[in-house]
Image (cartoon, rainbow, N blue to C red):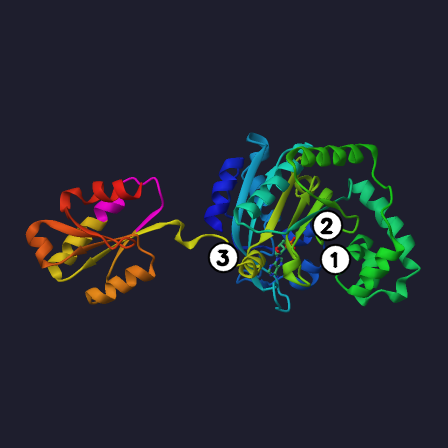
Amino acid sequence: MESISQDIFQKFGYREIRTPIIEEKSLFVKSIGEETDIVTKEMFSFKDRGEREIVLRPEGTAPIVRAYLEANLHKTDTFQKFYYMGSMFRAERPQAGRMRQFHQIGAEAIGSGLPEIDAEVIKLLTSLLDAMKIKGYKIRINNLGCKEDKTSLSKTLRGVLTKEKNALCDDCRKRLDINPLRVLDCKNESCRSLIRGAFKSVKFLCKKCDEHFNKVLACLDRLGIKYELDPYIVRGLDYYTQTVFEVTHPGLGSQDALGAGGRYDNLISDMGGPQLGAAGFALGVERILIVAAKQGPTVDPHDEKVVYVATMGDAARKKGFELIDLLRSDKWEKKVVFDMDYENKSLKAQMREADKLGAKFVLIIGDDEISKGEAMLRDMMTKEQQGVKFDDVVRTIKGKIE
Ligand code: AMP
């Protein structure tokens, strides 16, 4: 998955960034929001020996913005496109698709407020899933508007939902006071149906945000990306503004999000930088693996060609070791794996191993071959064998593989 992703990121012009696993707790409290689930319940936080409050990172966006500002990129190379892959940590009750240490593959485009960027990150996300041969996912999209629009939506929601307060779950009752937007994405079934009955989409977007969103949707249409408008998507993190989206998959059960993201136009300025637009997403690696396992093989494990060197005796092993180095040192167009036995196995066991690895060719070397100055090249499909002079080994294998 990682190497497939690297190819796609490279095509889109995103460069890799690696941030530390440990960050100061305040980074996430300020950015994700004091009253969010991640900050109140899900962070692994502790004090280090210097009595500093540190946490294992629960997500990638805030650390990347921190790194961007610390490196002063906002003053020199404002527009940056980053991708990341790595472990995230959330102290949750483990269940299917929900781990305390999990992995995300994500991207952040920092320094642009243009609608093309919202569309590009969504296209990037679908390109990744398509390259991983994930089928049947759904993109749901919403617009939260700017800070002022979010406040006006919160007010409307508080008004509508206060009447239903007693029927809401404990968490939602608290959310209603602190951050009513979050009631919209409660996973509790009874809250969900109540909210869907009480609240239909309302017009709360200012003209500018409405126009931005229409342009984003027009870009997505031009790219041929299918989406569903969903007024109930708000995302659990406070820093989102404008476009927010989720990718879900029916094969996942209750934890049905493969990934999510959106625009965060105030995060950079909230963290002490200039007012700059930005958008990104994160995909959950383990969730993709769950879907992939249900779908059956997605990525062909035999995409790479294997050449195995089987040797008998010390002199042959020495020669085989030399030849494998020659083979590996050459330039290969295709993905080729060169390997040999390091356990002193019998020839029969080495051939079994070559079979297990799906080897296309086996180079067999014994005392006879050493004395003739050649190796026996066996085509594992046709079972044909031919003697190849040691000096010709690389050229001959190249001719057969490429
Ligand atoms: P979030 O940062 O919460 O938007 O999460 C982005 C994606 O990461 C989700 O859609 C999931 O696919 C994945 N994810 C989040 N939390 C977990 C977890 N505890 N275990 C496994 N995957 C997770």
- Which residues lie in the magenta part? 325-337
Q: Which residue is mark 1?
A: 35
Q: Secondary structure at mark 1?
A: loop
> In this picture, is 165 found above or below 241?
below
- So how many labels did they put on this image? 3
Residue 161 in the figure: left or right of residue 65: right
**Residue extending farthest right:** 163
Q: Residues within 10 Å of mark 3 (few under 14, many from 20)?
A: few
Q: Which residue is nearer to you in this view: 179 or 85?
A: 85
Figure quadrant, ligand 1: bottom right
Distance CA(mark 2)–CA(mark 1): 9 Å
Seen from the viewer's position, the closer of residues 316 and 120 is: 316
Of mark 3 and mark 2, the one earlier in the sequence is 2
Tag 3 residue:
297
Q: Can the viewer see residue 275?
A: no
| Quarter of the figure with the C terminus | top left
- Give the mark nearest the N terminus, 3 or 1: 1
Asked whether the beta carbons under mark 2 and mark 1 sit within 8 Å of each other, the answer is yes
In this rendering, position of residue 191 left or right of residue 48: right
Name the amino acid, label 2.
Answer: Asp
Residue 238 numbered mark, or none: 2
Residue 122 x, y percent position in the rendering: 63, 41
Q: Given the image, on which type of amino acid does mark 1 rest?
A: Glu
**Of 124 and 368, which appears nearest the observer?**
368
Q: Residue at x 45, y 47 (%)?
A: 3
For marks 2 and 1 on the same chain, the one whose residue lies earlier in the sequence: 1
Residues at marks 3 and 2 touching, judged by CB atoms closer than 8 Å: no
Distance in Å between CA atoms under marks 3 and 1: 41 Å
Mark 3, secondary structure of its residue: loop
Q: Residues within 10 Å of mark 1 (few under 14, many from 20)?
A: some
